[in-house]
Amino acid sequence: MNDRVYNNGVDRLRSPERVERLEVDRVVDLCLDHNQIKSVLDVGTGSGLFAGAFAKRNIKIAGADLNPDMLETAKKYLPDTEFKVAVAEDLPFEDNSFDLVFMGVLLHEVNDFTKALQEAKRVAVKQVSVLEWKYAVEDFGPPLEHRLSEEFLSQLSDKVGFSKMEVVPLKNLMLYHFKN
């Protein structure tokens, strides 16, 4: 069992405190800002929190998560959305299937960071956006040893072959845009 994987119950994923901490609407707006995004793959969709926020903006959504129970909950909120059981390192979608691939507080949980970002890049036409915890000791979120530094993500971006990485600091988290 991967000790970095979230396993605190699906109900907590939608708590008002968590929604506020994640700045869901702001993050979605920043992902869509000045881009012609018409389709999004939400990797690690969980209960579909971010997928729902993208869907409210009339964006075509699909989701992937390794936990079938999470996907059952997501389907309750988004019954017409395609959800697939999958890990970030092996996405069951064709190359260039989505304008944007979004990973919300997921990348720090994967087993192979490079492979996960390569897969996201493979299925993304325009960009991959990664929401992650700040690289700091805090009283919420994962411990520091499970968090990803900006320097690490920049090196990963170069290794995977993105043209550039943009960093957007948020109140509690960091949003990284990797451009194809």
Image (cartoon, rainbow, N blue to C red):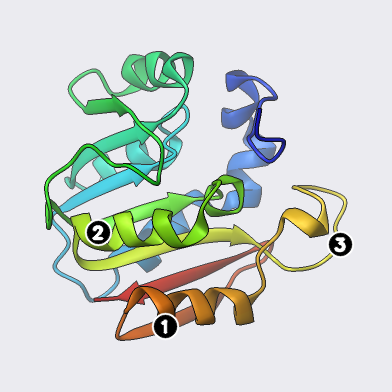
Q: In this view, does 27 lie to the left or right of 91?
A: right
- Give the total of numbered labels: 3
Q: In this view, does 67 lie to the left or right of 1?
A: left
Mark 1 / mark 2, whichever is N-terminal: 2
**Kind of residue sitting beneath label 3:** Val
Q: Which residue is drawn at 59% across and 51% down?
A: 22
Q: Which of 96 and 133 is in front in this view?
A: 96
Q: Is residue 111 above or below residue 16?
A: below
Disc marking residue 99: none
Q: Callout 1: helix, strand or loop?
A: helix
At label 3, counting other C-alpha atoms closer than 10 Å, the crowd grade (few under 14, some 14-19, many 20 or more) is few
Q: Nearer the viewer, residue 57 or 93?
A: 93
Q: Residue at x 57, y 29 (%)?
A: 14
**Kind of residue sitting beneath label 2:** Leu
Mark 1 / mark 3, whichever is N-terminal: 3
Q: Quadrant of residue 151?
A: bottom right
Residue 16 lies, in percent from the top left, at 63, 34
Disc marking residue 158: 1
Mark 3 / mark 2, whichever is N-terminal: 2
Disc marking residue 137: 3
Q: Nearer the viewer, residue 169 or 64?
A: 64
Residue 116 lies, in percent from the top left, at 41, 54
Single out the mark in the foreground, 1 or 3.
Answer: 1
Which residue does the numbered mark 2 point to in the structure image?
A: 100
Q: Is residue 47 above or below residue 44?
A: above
Spatial separation of the CA atoms under disc 1 and disc 3? 26 Å
